[in-house]
Amino acid sequence: MEQGQAPSEKPGRPPAQSTLHEVRTAENSAAYLLPKVQSMKEANPHLTLLDVGAGSGTISVSFAQLIPDGHVTGVDLNPDILPRARAVAEMAGVENIDFQQGSVYKLPFADETFDVTCCHQVLIHIGTPWDALREMLRVTKRGGIVAAREGDYETECVWPDLPYLSKFHKLMAGLMSAGGGTPTAGRQLVSWALKAGAEPSQITLSYSPSSYDTPSRRKICSQGLCDQLRGGSMRAKALKFGLGSEDDFEQMAAAWEEWAKRDDASLAMLNGEILVQK
């Protein structure tokens, strides 16, 4: 979701807790939406797209590359991550994009501003996701698309079954629940869209996995999680809610490091995806 930037980190460098998130692109995190964007682009090259909870902007930037004659706006609640997102766009040579601060509950745009409004792993973290979807629908044009992809932690599978990785899974689910989120968000997307005011005929549901099954992806996954366990926002929140000790976090980090070195290691989770035709 929206990741913070430590005061010691410079805008051009990725925040420690964003290491894992910056492997995300439109291609690997929004494949369910790409055919719709492509067909809409063919009808209207000047497509406008809003990425809600953009974080460090890698998904937003890849969308901007896909619609070079259109424009992408990335919004994140945390203003501290926006310099990193702008740096990511600059490094990619992408100019048809802007980033600004804003809440998914009160987006700073007029009604019917965007052709496409999307989010990735945002609704899973918030207390009333149907209100967020209602707001996303508000800023989307008639005939446009609202899209969301969210994980379902009860579908997560990891190998090898190291004890502290099982504890980590419980920690993540506990953190989401304690913070008002929903660990099983992926399976609830249709119900949330209906609660937001969408009709069943407007909604298309799909599922797809996210996985870390190659040495390079395992290394990125392990590094990102270890950064958070040893000094990122995950550790701070877990301590705040009493969900573990410093020794627990170090043991979990060591388990992820061991996992990343194993030739037989794998990790996957199922994600729910919806397209809502406005």
Image (tube, rainbow, N blue to C red):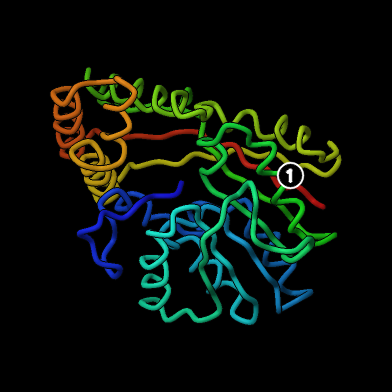
For disc 1, the neighbor class at 10 Å (few under 14, some 14 to 19, many from 20) is many
| Total numbered badges shown on the rendered structure | 1
**Which secondary structure, mark 1?**
helix
| Image vertical order of residue 272 relative to residue 173, above or below | below
Looking at the picture, which amino acid does disc 1 mark? Arg
Residue 130 lies left or right of residue 217; in this view the side is: right
Q: Is residue 148 above or below residue 82?
A: above
Q: Position of residue 128 (x, y in %)?
A: 63, 33
- Direction from residue 278 to residue 18 in the image, left or right: left
> In the rendering, at what x and y percent does residue 18 appear?
33, 52
Residue at x-position 26% and y-position 41%: 228
Q: Position of residue 68 (x, y in %)?
A: 59, 79
Residue 156: image location, x then y, percent: 42, 28
Label 1, on which residue?
A: 134
Residue found at x 65% / y 43%: 132
User: In the figure, is residue 135 to the left or right of 214?
Assistant: right
